[in-house]
Image (cartoon, rainbow, N blue to C red):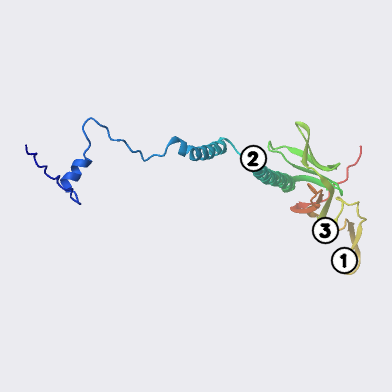
Amino acid sequence: MRRPRRRPAPRASASPSPSAARTEMRPQPGRLRPRVSSRPSASSRLPFRAADTTRADEAKRRRKGFTLIEVLIAMALFALIGVAGFTLLNSVLRTQDATDTRLGRMAEIQRAMLVVSSDLDQITGSLGGGATSLSLQKADITGGIVNVRYDLNGDALTRTITGAGGERVQTLLTRVSSLRWTFHRRRGDWLDAWPQPQQPALPLTGPDGSPLSSGPAPDEGVTAVALDITLTGVDGQPTATLRRVASIPLMEPAPPVVAP
């Protein structure tokens, strides 16, 4: 009996065909292909996670508050700003107080000089006085006559009005160091008091030298009154001297008062 001959197996090709390659790479049904993840494993990420956590915690602590050095610097800056602001405010207030004081003083002086000038302009009667006092008569707003007297009482210039309504004392100017009244006569000289003591009668002679009559000395009228005031300085300021000259109607010397 004859044995059948075996056919040789086909040789494998050196380069498989594309279809064969696709067949080999095709997954078999029912078998899952392993999934490859690009993320590192938890064990490999531990050092990086620890470093990130440390930086995050440090950033959180910084966001929660200031450091001691930052607090000290901020307090120093606030202190400097506060001191500068207080110094500026104090300087402004002191300047304002000094300005108000000087303006008030100037207003007081102007008011006093205005009253003195008004009284001298309204003289209607006698006028007399010495170095530190002055007496005059003037018309009242009601049409009557009132007596006005100026005196230096301590360091204040006072004005006393005596009339039908009684006596009224008014303080015109304060912080007066010295005061002086002077009177200008028609002949051109200044006197410290008015009226002057009675002058002796002067003999009057005619062209031929014969005596005519005797009478008082001529040119005895007052044409102006001057007031010199020395004021005490305010807040360490130097003293100031004021002079006010007021022209008045020609005033004849008042006749002497004869006691009954």
- In the image, residue 162 above or below residue 106: above
Residue found 79% across the figure and 53% down from its top:
240
Residue found 84% across the figure and 60% down from its top:
189
Residue toward you, 205 or 15: 15
* Rendered image quadrant of residue 259: top right
Query: Which residue reaches farthest bottom?
Result: 208
Q: Which amino acid does the dot numbered 1 rest on?
A: Gly
Residue where numbered disc 2 is placed: 71
Tell us which disc is closer to us: 1 or 2.
2
Q: Which one is earlier in the sequence, the residue at label 2 or at label 3?
A: 2
Report the Cα–Cα distance between label 1 and label 2: 109 Å
Q: Position of residue 222 (x, y in %)?
A: 80, 54
Q: Which mark is residue 48?
A: none
Q: Which one is earlier in the sequence, the residue at label 1 or at label 3?
A: 1
Tell us which disc is closer to us: 2 or 3.
2
Q: Residues within 10 Å of mark 2 (few under 14, many from 20)?
A: few
- Tell me the quadrant of the picture where the C terminus can be found: top right
Q: Residues within 10 Å of mark 3 (few under 14, many from 20)?
A: few
- In the image, residue 196 above or below residue 150: below
Which element is circle 1 on?
loop
Residue where numbered disc 1 is placed: 206
Residue where numbered disc 3 is placed: 219
Question: Mark 1 and 2 residues: CB-CB less than 8 Å, in contact?
Answer: no
Q: Position of residue 110 (x, y in %)?
A: 71, 47
Report the Cα–Cα distance between label 2 and label 3: 90 Å
